[in-house]
Image (tube, coloured by chain):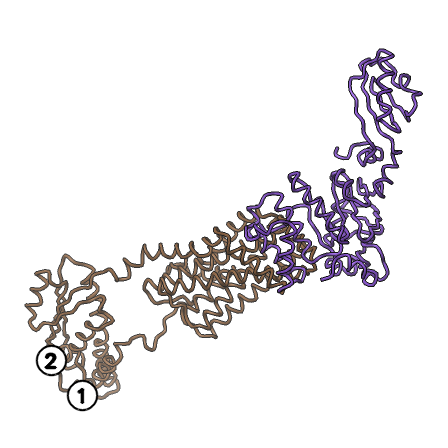
Chain colours: A brown, B purple
Amino acid sequence: MKVIAIALKDVRRNLRSGMLLVMMFAVPLLVTALMYAAFGRSGAGDDLAAVRVQVVNLDARVPFAGDVEAGAQLVEHLSSPELADLLTVEERVDPEAARQAVDRGEAAVAVIVPRNLTASAVGTAQRATVELYSDPALTVGPSIVREIVTGFLDGFNGSRIAADVVTRQLRESGRAAATGEARTAATMYAEWFEAHHDRPDASLSVRTPDGSVAEGGMVGMLSLVLTGMMIFFVFFTGANTATSIVREHEEGTLARLHTTPTEPSTVLTGKFCAIAATLLVQVLVLVTAGALIFDVDWGGGLALALATLALVTTATGFGLWLMSLVGSSRQSGPVIGVVLTVTGMAGGLMTTGFTNLPSAFDHVTLFTPQGWVLRTWKLGLAHASMEELLPPFLACLAIAAALFALGARAMRRRFA
Amino acid sequence: MPTALERADQTTTDAGGDQAAVSIRGVSMSFGDLQAVKDVSLTIGQGEVFSLLGPNGAGKSTLINILTGLLRPTEGDARVLGHSIRTDPTHVKRLLGVVPQDIALYPDLSARENLRFWGRMFGLRGADLDQRVEEILLVVGLTDRQRDRVGTFSGGMKRRLNIAAALLHDPRVVVMDEPTVGIDPQSRRAILDHVKSMNQQGTTVVYTTHYMEEAQELSDRLAIMDHGTVIAEGTHAELVRIVGEKDRIALKLDDGESDGAELFGGLNGVGSIHAEDGHVVLLADDSDQLLPVLFERAAGRGVRISSMDVQEPNLESVFLHLTGRALRE
């Protein structure tokens, strides 16, 4: 009961501090919002006008190609809902009319699919060329269309390569290169590609070695920025609220507590619970705000729970330990500022949005508690498995326990 | 809940036959080379108001901190209602209500929140806690301001709340460490009246102060401390007898050449006399009767008395007599 009473009293005092509330909630969200305003909208494509595309499909069916229709597949791909934000596709029959539409500025690009695209893909015709007719005054729109079309055609180029490989291997094994076998290989590849190119990531989970999300896009970057800011300011709150022990010592209320029938360990446990509870409130608010405001996908519920536990316990232990080193509350401000800035930077909290840092930096971050916490959160964001998540999580708990033990020992010596 | 007076009747059982509310035996406390308290022994009876009087740095607060469990004595032991501070400190803390010298409250909590918190630290909860908070707020006159944050209170209101927080659990012994420092006369009067009221209900009060008047007004018995030791102990009357219950008259003669001892020596009612460079200090059985005689004698000899100071025997003169310096030097 006394532990709860002490904890509630401290939480109440924390939540009545206007400055602390600003640092707990407003500042991390504000920094992330600034990043969002600076990069998010302009770079994500939401405000980018969709590229107007004229498509002319002259591709003809091929008798031996089975279900393969490369031209139709390309038109379907360009018109797919996934690309709707980027492209506005209009189909035409006449290539010249499409080109004139570009000339008149009614479209940025005309994509003209040749008659022999499928035949080329299954190896019954020579090289086929898809024509991109674009407005020379434009750069971004035509580049986007070129990348999309090239990526699509690379798949069908694979079928030609498959046919060539079959032909060469047959020749090397001393057999005559049978046209039918090579065509079958090309057709099979083309059919496979047709069946799978709409969902290229279905069997692929791309992740960097440190667990950071490899997916591009602003939301992924903002998730990391908010995570870094959240960890930094949760550690700040942990240290700041741990100052209450020093402050109570100076104000005389700690001595008064010791004149009551309350064990020093009860007082310290109450303080610990108060810090942890305050940090938990902070994390829950920031996580909820991140999901609602910035569309952050925090990963699975269990992963989020483990990451939250890792953050709250480590920041609490770190705060207690750090405050056990300061002589007075006047010292605590500069100490918190310097130590948390240095360890926060070394822990990678300020550079979560950067992708071009040396890989050695990932190892440097693990020399700080913040680095381990950040790793746990990144794995959660990347929907990592429990096997991947548990080691950094357990490392955080071990660090938290060690820091708490050191801090509690020093505090008992000084204040008990 | 029984009153303090009723509880005092049960003390013999609790204390294992020890009738004293507080018993201090051979307590010493050193901080490195500095010996703050030297072999102090005191006995405070139940229902007494006992004052520790002494200048700043005399060792009063250190002795109080030992008694309340904040410091562990280098030597000796103290018992509160029979319970040792060494072997049973938690029980001692339940019996004591401690009013610290400085305001020890949470300024960002309301008066009510502060009292509820300190009540919980003494194990009160639920309806008992609510009832005690209401009673204490009424006693210290803060019911109307109970929901205001303590940081907005005046110094006197904070002092009263500081005392209230120590009384929530209805302690048998209240230790008050200079509770009137730095407050206005009205609040000071209220606190002194409250101490008397508590005592009338049977609560033992251990009161430290360097204000002689407070000690004189409140105390059944008192001890004077200086340099970590108790230099005198007893009732006010007993202590005053140390200086012989004589009034102290100090005179300054205009004629510095006159011999004060020769001038006033031999007069009826004059005790000891000390004269030097025109200053005369003499002890008198009754200053009211003697003063006209002194002026008549001086006028008759053509000597003018330029200033006069009369002190009836009090704790200040006791301290002066025992240490050679004033209490507030």
Chain label for disc 2: A
Going by the picture, which residue comes out furthest to the right? B266
The residue at 25%/76% (across/down) is A198
Distance CA(mark 1)–CA(mark 2) = 20 Å
Q: Residues within 10 Å of mark 2 (few under 14, many from 20)?
A: some
Q: Quadrant of the C terminus of chain B?
A: top right
The residue at 19%/87% (across/down) is A178
The x and y percentages for residue A411 are 64, 56
Q: Tell which tag, 1 or 2, sits nearer the viewer.
A: 2
Dot 1 amino acid type:
Gly
Where residue A300 sits, quadrant-wise, is: bottom left
Residue B58 position (above or below residue B7): above
Q: Which residue is mark 1?
A: A180
Q: Quadrant of the N terminus of chain B?
A: bottom right
Residue A109 position (above or below residue B32): below
The x and y percentages for residue B238 are 87, 40
Residue A393 position (above or below residue A251): below
The x and y percentages for residue B194 are 70, 47
Where residue A265 sits, quadrant-wise, is: bottom right
Q: The residue tagged with tag 2: helix, strand or loop?
A: loop
Instruction: Decide if residue B33 is in sight here.
Output: no
Q: Nearer the viewer, residue A190 or A180?
A: A190
Q: Is residue B58 left or right of residue A102?
A: right
Dot 2 amino acid type:
Ala
Q: The residue tagged with tag 1: helix, strand or loop?
A: helix
Where residue A210 sits, quadrant-wise, is: bottom left
Instruction: Decide if residue A270 is in sight here.
Output: yes
Q: Which residue is mark 2?
A: A60
Chain label for disc 1: A
Disc number at residue A170? none
